[in-house]
Image (tube, grey):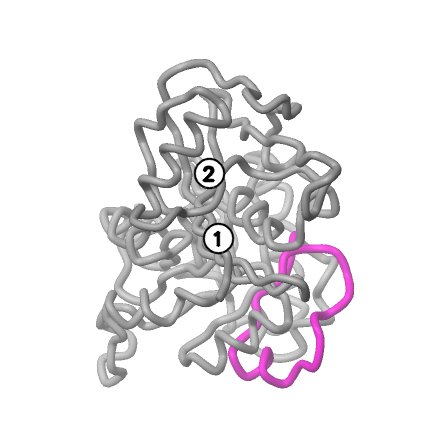
Amino acid sequence: MPIHVAAAAILDNLGRVLISKRADHLHQGGLWEFPGGKVEAGESVRQALVRELKEELDILPLDIKPLIRIQHNYGDRQVLLDFFRVTRFEGEAKGLEGQPLRWLQPEEMQAESFPAADRPVITALQLPDRYLITGREPTQPEDFLRRLDLALTNGLRLVQLRAHALDDAAYKHLLNAASPLCERYNAKLLVNRPSGCVRWLGMADGIHLTANQMVALDARPSGKGLIGASCHTRKELEQASQLRLDYVFLSPVAPTATHPNTAALGWGKFSDWVENVNLPVYALGGMHPNMLGQASQAGAQGIAAIRSLWPEG
């Protein structure tokens, strides 16, 4: 029976996250963690979180949203962790149990300083809730880059350069033009190529694999950068988790004009499938920014889209 834990990524108005250090004598002692604790008998997960944050930090969370659910086997024990994002709270956080506290930007967090079960949480905190897949006109670079600039101005910070109509040389030329543009806005740019995607790792901030490219892998590709993949089945989600990818798409959640004959998963099945996936999952297929709340409640990191996020003007 896994130990059920409720934990929180508590954010201040600067976007920093509160972490606390585990006492040396505890399991995973000496490592940094996100505040929280065991769910007691008769408690809901949220009730446990509110109680633990009051007991540990003397704060009352006011705005609680699901972040990610993690199951992990340490060998000597199994844990089930429900993580939440707390963006408003009452009181001033202090270590009531003598534990050291730090406020860090997500990008400052070093995964090796945290228990293994917490590491996907760091990735989830570093990823935004909207993921842009580039749209029309990659064969017209000027117009394409103008639209990309508009999207970045509108706050998009994670972009997949999808331009299958281009050969490798033309794609590389467009990538070289898009990279400094994304860098200017502190946005991450990922490569999506229909063949040989892994060899592009290191030429941008990461790569996005098709489901077929992913299932052909025996291990996570070596090299720096984010690695994500498209998934359409439970088996593909399990493969992505085993490969320790950074995120996945799960689609189609809703009916789409581009794939009218493909059955949509719906939010119920989406939620059921992602419940045991230890990595951030973006909902794809018929998504719109006004669905972000629904996506979060279903366990998604956020939404991925072309049409609703790619500027038409």
Q: Quadrant of residue 87?
A: top left
- Please tell me whether residue 242 is drawn above or below residue 297 in the rendered image: below
Q: Is residue 218 above or below residue 137?
A: below
Q: Residue at x 59, y 36 (%)?
A: 106
Q: Which amino acid, mark 2?
A: Ala
Quarter of the view holding residue 63: top left
Badge 2 is on which residue? Answer: 8
Vertical side of 256 occupied by 123: above or below: above
Q: Which comes before the other along the chain, label 2 or label 1?
A: 2
Which label belongs to residue 96? none
Residue found 65% across the figure and 52% down from its top: 205
As shown in the figure, which amino acid type bears the numbered disc 1? Leu
What residue do we see at 38% from left, 33% from top?
51
Question: How far across and how far down the image is residue 152, in percent?
Answer: 46, 40
Give x and y (percent) for residue 67.
42, 47
Q: Is residue 227 visible?
A: yes
Q: Secondary structure at mark 1?
A: strand
Outermost residue on the front side: it is 41
* Residue at the image position 44 percent from the left and 59 percent from the top: 133
Q: CA distance from mark 2 to mark 1?
A: 10 Å
Q: Is residue 63 left or right of residue 25?
A: left
Residue 174, horizontal then vertical, whole percent: 60, 57
- On screen, residue 166 above or below 306: below
Q: Quadrant of the C terminus?
A: top left
> Label 1 belongs to which residue?
81
Membership of 176 in magenta stretch: no
Labels 2 and 1 touching (C-beta < 8 A): no
The part of the image, by quadrant, that contains residue 46 is: top left
Q: How packed is label 2: few (under 14 Cα within 10 Å), some, or many (20 or more)?
A: many
The magenta region covers 205-227
Whether residue 256 is visible to the viewer of this picture, yes or no, is no
